[in-house]
Every structure is written in C-alpha cells, then in structure tokens.
Amino acid sequence: MKLEIGLFGNPNCGKTTLFNALTGGNRSVGNWTGTTVTLDIGHFHYKKQAIDLVDIPGIYSLFTHTPEQLTGCEYLLNYHPDVLLNVVDSTNLERNLYLTTQLVESGIPVVVALNMHDAMQERGLFVDAKKLSELLGAPCVKISAAKGYGIDKLLDTIMAVVKNPSLCDSDRIVNQFSPEIRTKLEQIVAQIDDDAVPEHIDRHWVGLQMMKEHWQGDLPEELRGQGDAWESAISEERYRIIGQIVSQVITVSPLIRRRQLSERIDDIVCNRYLALPIFCVVMFLIFFLAFGPLGNALNDLFEHLFTDLIAGWVSDGLAAIGASAFVSGLIVDGIIGGVGAVIVFLPQLAILFICLSLLEFSGYMARAAFITDKLLAKFGLSGMSFIPMILGFGCSVPAIMACRALDNKKERLLTMMIIPFFSCSARMPVYAVFAAAFFTDKQYLVIFALYLLGIAVALLTSVLLRRKIMGKERAVFLMEMPPYRKPVWHCIWSSVWVRVWDFISRAGTIILLASLVVWLLSNVNFSFQMVGADQSILSSIGKFIAPVFSPMGFGYWQIAVALITGFMAKEAVISTLGVLYASTALPLSAVLTSLISPASAFALMVFVLLYTPCVATLTAMRRESRSAKYTLFMMLYQLGAAWIISFLIYQLVNLLI
Amino acid sequence: MNINDLKPTETARIISLDGLDAKTAKKLRDLGMTIGQHIKFIQRAPLGDPVWIELRGYQLAFSSRIAANIAVERGGGAS
C-alpha cells in the first residue's frame, strides 16, 4: 500500500526545502478534481515503503476564504491522506502553531516538523519537543530541512503514527476553548448530518467551520451568531491557548540575546536613504550578470558548439552515409538550425533564473516589495504585485501563478493582465540576435531600452485598466517580512533546474516540431512538390499577412511566418527565421541586415516584446483568472498595443534619423 | 491613537481592530494580531508607506491605510 502524506505549512516555513529534501526532486504534477489548482506530488521510498507527498500551497489558516486555503480544505475533505505533515518554523512558533491547531482538529493524524532547529540554537532558544507533542496532541520532531538534520526521525515518527493513530489526539486543543465556545460548538455538532461529512473528518472541525460567518447561513436560526463574532472569538481563543503552550515549551538562554543579524542587515538594506539606491543596484546587477559579458561569453561558447561543431559533424556524417539533400536539409537546417538557434541562450537563462531564485530564497524579494509599494501605488498596484512582476522577467507562467499571493481578486486580475509586458526570458533570444546584427556596439543599450519599454507599457496599462477592474477600490499591502536566510544551494539549484529543464524540453518538443513543420512547409507547395521557398505553402500564408507589417518596414513573408510561430513560444521567432534563411548559406545576422533597416529591426523587437503572449501564458491566464473574456480581451489588447507602439516608434526613429 | 502614531522601536498594545473592514481584520487576527497583543514598531518604508512592525516574534508589513485603523495604546513589554 502506498502511503499518502499531505504537506502543510505557513508561507516561508521551509516547506519547499523539506519537500525537496524528502523527494530529491522526484515530482509530478497532479491535477486534482475538485480542487482549483494543480498540486505537486513527490514520490519517494522509506524503509521499502512507497510514499506520495502532496504539496499543499503555503497557508496561514484553514478557516478563511482565499484560493489556497480552500485548496487545503478541499484536500482534507475529499482525499484520504494517511498523515498530515505540518512544517513549522520554530523561530516563529506562535504564528505557525495557529495552523497546526486547526490541522490537529481535523481528526487526520498530524506529525509536526519543528523546522529551523539550527537557527533556534543560534538564537539561544530551546523547544521542549516532547512537552509540545503532549500539549498539542500531535508528535513533534525537531528537524533542519536545509541541513538534512532529523529527517529519518521524522519519517520514523510518521510510520509510527500510521501504525498507531492514537498517538494523536484531535480533541486536545478543542477541549481548552472557553466554555461559551464549547457549548455552542457541541450544539452545532449535534445538528450535523453524519452523511454529509466524510468519515475521516472530526465533527468538531466541521462544527468550527460552520461557525464561520461564511457558513452560518446553513445553520438553524437560533444557532447563528452576530456576523463574524464567533469567528473572531475562536481566533482569539486559539491564540490564547497557543500562548499558554508556547510559554511552557520555549526556554530562552539568558546568555545569548544579541541583536539578530537579519535586523542589522535591514538597518542598511531598508535604510531610509540607502534602500532605493541598493534596490536599483541589485536590479542592475541581475541584468548585468545575465546579459553582460559573462552571459554573452557563455552564449558564444554554446553557439560555437552548436552551429559550428555539431552542425558540421552531422552534415559531414550525413554526407558520408550518402543521405539525400532532403534528409540532410531536414536535419541540418530544420532541426539543428531551429533548435540550435534557441538552445544557445540556455546559459543566460540559467543565470537569470539563479538570480531570481536567490532573491526569493534570501528574503530580499519581500523587502523589495516593501520598498516599491508606494511607487506602484501611483499606478493602481501595490508592493504585493512586485514579486509576480519581477518573476515575469523569467517566465510569465510562474509569474501569473505567483499572483495567488494577492488576496484581493481584482488586484490579482489587474496584476495578471500586465505581467506579459514584462519581457520574459524566451523573448531574449530574439533581442539578442537582432541587437547583435544591427546595433553591435550599442546592443546592451538597445536591449535595456526594450526592458524599460515593457515596464512602461505595463504600468501604463495598469493606469488604463485600474478603473475598469478595481473600480473605486485601492490596492492594499499586507505581507510577512521573513528574516534573511542563507541560500541553500541545493534548493536554489532544484528550483532553477525545473525552469531550465522546461526550456530544454520546450526546445526539444515545441521548437523542434515547429522547426520541422516550418522547414517542410517552406519547401513544398500546395501539391506537395519540392519547390523553392518562394513558391512554398508557407510563403503563401506569410505573403497574405506580411502587408500588415509593411508600415514598419518588415513586411516580409518570412518574418510574418516567424511571428506566427512565436505564438507557440516566443523563442520560435528566431528558430523559424533560422530555418527559413538557412538555405541562403549566410549567417542569419547577415541576411537580416541586408533585408531591413535598423529602425525596422528595432520596431520588430518592440513588436515581439509587446504582442500576444505565448499559448502557455494564455492558458495560465485563463486558468488563474477563470475568465475567458479577460483572457481574450488581453490577447487583443496586446496585439493592438504592439502594432501601434511599434508603428509609432518606427515613424519616430525615421523622423529623428 | 493608531499604529501610524508610533515611532521606530516603540512598543504598543492592540486595543481594537473595529475600524478595519471585516476581511482585513480577519486576516490580521489569523496572523496573530489579537486584542491585547503587544507589538513593536520597526520602521516606515523609505517612501513613507507601508509600515513594518513586529509581533509574536515575527515581522509583518502593511499599508498605512490599514495601520490607521488599528487602535493601540503606547507601552507594554516587547512582543
């Protein structure tokens, strides 16, 4: 029998670190019917027992109404986890135990992982885990997920609880609620229809849920309370009980009471005068690392490897075995020309993703949100939108998912709408090729200008749409400020690897397929005879659309086709051009410079920056916004904005030169 | 007085969350901001908004608009 463990915890408690430590990154994505989001499931073995670990999004409480919290409740009610594993940040015990008490009440056995044991020792704090287990009614084990300490003991405890569920006591906390709440709760529990509640869930937990303002309507009139009076009374009671528990289990060493390192860092990083300059330096540094000399040198290395070495070997090999022109064209020009044009940008992408992960794991991201809140407020957003926005430079899909952190539905929608304008890493290969071909000595400046233009259009869009989406409401900031943490390299690596692998597998699937199809369609005509590219199927399609781009000077059928394939994935713009111009035997940059003017090239880059996001982004937006209407609107809006701005810039540049 | 009236390192006790809309009050209560709870004011953001406080051994930041609706009285021990 497979064992199923549900992994719960507050945001910033080290849940992801433990997930990776336990599963070694072996995960799949589960699409759970009944839940609104997809959940990560990790697979591993312990002492010959196969275990599935289901990662529930970080939450503070099971008793409120945000998408994540509903996911947590739906998971408890509709699935049958054998054990719940609750990760707790020991350095922040009171707030973390709030969720723990709610999990224990559910009636499903809970094991508590007291994480960050090492940080506790540094601060001179000691937790009595045995006593805490007794008081909570759930076994507690001290661990350090980052250092791998206590993991085996944790798993042994989980096994013990599976064998003997009576090690947990779901009533321990409930029994300590005030008599007033308990009486009310028992009255409500007596009313519960047994058939309506899954067997594995404790009635008290259901009763407490029903005392929430949201569900009170389902109760008989005499049992209802005034608004959220019960709800707030229960919160207060919970914290009162937790306060008593914590005072009994935590001992503070009198010798160590020095100021936290984290606070001393914040004295500088969040200093009134230094905060904004430091923020700008950090942002510049990321850009410089990824797109500066280091990233470029690595790219050149990859490019040499692909286009010179591998393509050379393969075409020599194919010639040696006497392959036909069709086959060698398909492989060398189609596959290597297309996929290679994209894959050379892998190093720059990896650097960018490492930087973004570092920002997230270290805790600086929350500070950046804090610092930029007032600035974003001018555009109808708040600092809460900052994190999704900056993640958008990596990839729009995780950025749109990160919008879940925004409680306010309208603010979430507004942020989602502007994310595609933040230039994602897939667009970078396009800029890089054009900038290197047309603006040799000024390429950094040109790429930097594009990034800035993207941000400007995003903020402008927010100003335009805020009235329509937000109405009179104003965005609000509310965020935990976690202490700085030393980056744990294997965690950063595994988060970077997911994204890097996504890029590689896209190159091997979508880009490969698109390259093949493009090559094929550009070499045959409608009666499927091999013809020159000019009479091919693709040229007919491209020539139909190309006039739309003539006002910007890039109305060529090859470019029109490239932009269409860019809809599948933006980097396909380059792979398609690579395929279509491969037969000219000139480097792509030489072909392009002979074809269009620098002004046209810049207008084209602007168009690629702003036009309709890729299919994956649109799918994510549709799923997360749950609105086909807004997704469609956004698609058309971006297409329109891209054309108009690209046109204006082209005309402007031509006027100036 | 409310949280906006506090200065860095000052401590205070929460008196009421009644000025807040129900949703925000509930969220703050879940985060441990209960009546009678001690808090410490850490700092204001460089541009003046949001504010940053400490309670129950951890740190939380929120808009001044929220802070303005949380009634406190000065004094009390550390959180």
Image (cartoon, rainbow, N blue to C red):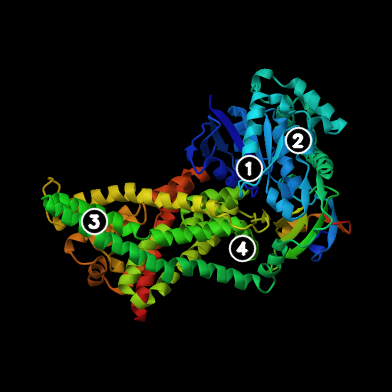
Determine the CA span between mark 4 and mark 2. Answer: 38 Å
In the rendered structure, find residue A133 and report the number of the disc placed on it.
2
Residue A227 visible (yes or no): no
Which numbered mark, 4 or 1, is in the foreground of this view?
Answer: 4
Q: Please determine if labels 4 and 1 lie on a single subunit.
A: yes
Q: Position of residue A620 (x, y in %)?
A: 47, 46
Q: Which amino acid is tagged 4?
A: Ala
Residue ID for mark 4: A368
Q: Does dot 3 land on a helix, a strand or a loop?
A: helix
Residue ID for mark 1: A66
Image side of residue A280 versus residue A638, left or right: right
Q: Which amino acid is tagged 3?
A: Gly
Which numbered mark, 4 or 2, is in the foreground of this view?
Answer: 2
In the rendered structure, find residue A542 and report the number of the disc placed on it.
3
Q: Are marks 3 and 1 in contact (CB under 8 Å)?
A: no
Residue A226 visible (yes or no): yes
- Quarter containing the C terminus of chain A: bottom left
Determine the CA span between mark 3 and mark 1. Answer: 46 Å
Which numbered mark, 2 or 1, is in the foreground of this view?
Answer: 2
Kindly identify the residue that appears in the image at 17 percent across and 63 percent down: A584
Q: Does dot 1 land on a helix, a strand or a loop?
A: loop
Kindly identify the residue that appears in the image at 73 percent across and 52 percent down: A121
Q: Are marks 4 and 2 in contact (CB under 8 Å)?
A: no
